[in-house]
Amino acid sequence: MNHTHEKYERLIEVCKALPPLVVAVAHPCDRTSLESAVKAHEMGLISPLLVGPRERIREVAEECGLNIAGLPIVDAPHSHASAEKAVELVREAKAEALMKGSLHTDEVMAAVVKREGGLRTQRRVSHCFIMDVPGHENVLIISDAAINIAPTLADKVDIVQNAIDLGHALRLEEVRVAILSAMETVNPKVPSTLEAAALCKMVDRHQITGALVDGPLALDNAIDLEAAKTKKIDSPVAGRANVLIVPDLEAGNMLAKSLSFLAGADAAGIVLGARVPIILTSRADSLQSRLASCAIASLVALKRREEAQMAG
């Protein structure tokens, strides 16, 4: 499938003008993870700190023809220690973001959400896919399809706010959030429709801020104007959503993978709600989407710096 990455390329171009983001890369001990860090470094997107077994990282670099001369390696004996050490570098303000290498997502996240010595904030941690869908004008943010399995209404408040904040960091002119369900009417038998209605009321009461939010909406009338008109849905979001909030992890996972494998979309990924952005990539991701994930983390970190300066 011929797919240009113009949406990701725009993001990457914006970030090339910014100072490179210092990223602690946890356990980059296979081609995919080390290549992501090295290529993002060569493009000026990140300044990586490679955290893991020194000799193994050097071996992988040599086998794969990757130039890591001049890149600092912070020695750690195994993947678990690499995750802990990478988190520690963030806590010591030596890194502004975290990147998952060749270890399991739960290993990284266990180090992040630890009560003592982790990177927790008041917010619940959530994941966003930033999808580049062929034929769709802008990127689509989908949340949460990777961390929160069956989020409660309280969890969803943070999931929605994290996704809205990401939309602003990505410089979307207007963030339009659709709370997805299987239908667009509130039905007491379908809990996700009740939660969608509650979230919209929370927006009215400024418990969630910074976006136009509507729901429940079915996927068709969230992103297709004709579908929204046919259903006579009068809403500034219907047919024009750029953020899709899914009812649970299973729905989100199926939606994101359908777009990737049936519609040829690329999926960049980031975790929000911790002290710093966390770049979560999968071995199946294209290099372009892995680079886009680095660019997105850079924009999120920039937005945080600007907010900290305004607050300070």
Image (cartoon, rainbow, N blue to C red):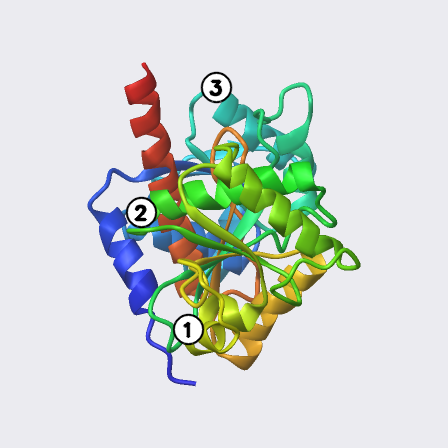
| Mark toward the start of the polypeptide (3 vs 1) | 3
Which residue is farthest left?
17
Which residue is farthest right?
189
Residue under label 3: 92
Q: Position of residue 31 (x, y in %)?
A: 52, 59
Under mark 3, the amino acid is Glu
> In the displayed structure, would residue 74 be above or below residue 55?
above
Secondary structure under badge 1? helix
Under mark 2, the amino acid is Leu
Q: Nearer the viewer, mark 3 or mark 1?
A: 1
Badge 1 crowding class, 10 Å Cα cut-off, few under 14, some 14 to 19, many 20 or more, is: some
Residue under label 1: 225
Q: Nearer the viewer, residue 73 or 167?
A: 167
Q: Number of callouts in the render? A: 3
Give how far apart the Cα atoms at labels 1 and 2 are: 36 Å
Residue, x 39% and y 48% (percent of image)? 167
Secondary structure under badge 3? loop
Give how far apart the Cα atoms at labels 3 and 1 are: 48 Å
- Residue 66 visible? The answer is no
- Marks 3,1: beta carbons within 8 A: no
Residue 158 falls left or right of residue 104: left
- Residue 305 visible? The answer is yes
Residue under label 2: 45
The label on residue 9 is: none
Residue, x 70% and y 44% (percent of image)? 106
Residue, x 55% and y 24% (percent of image)? 88
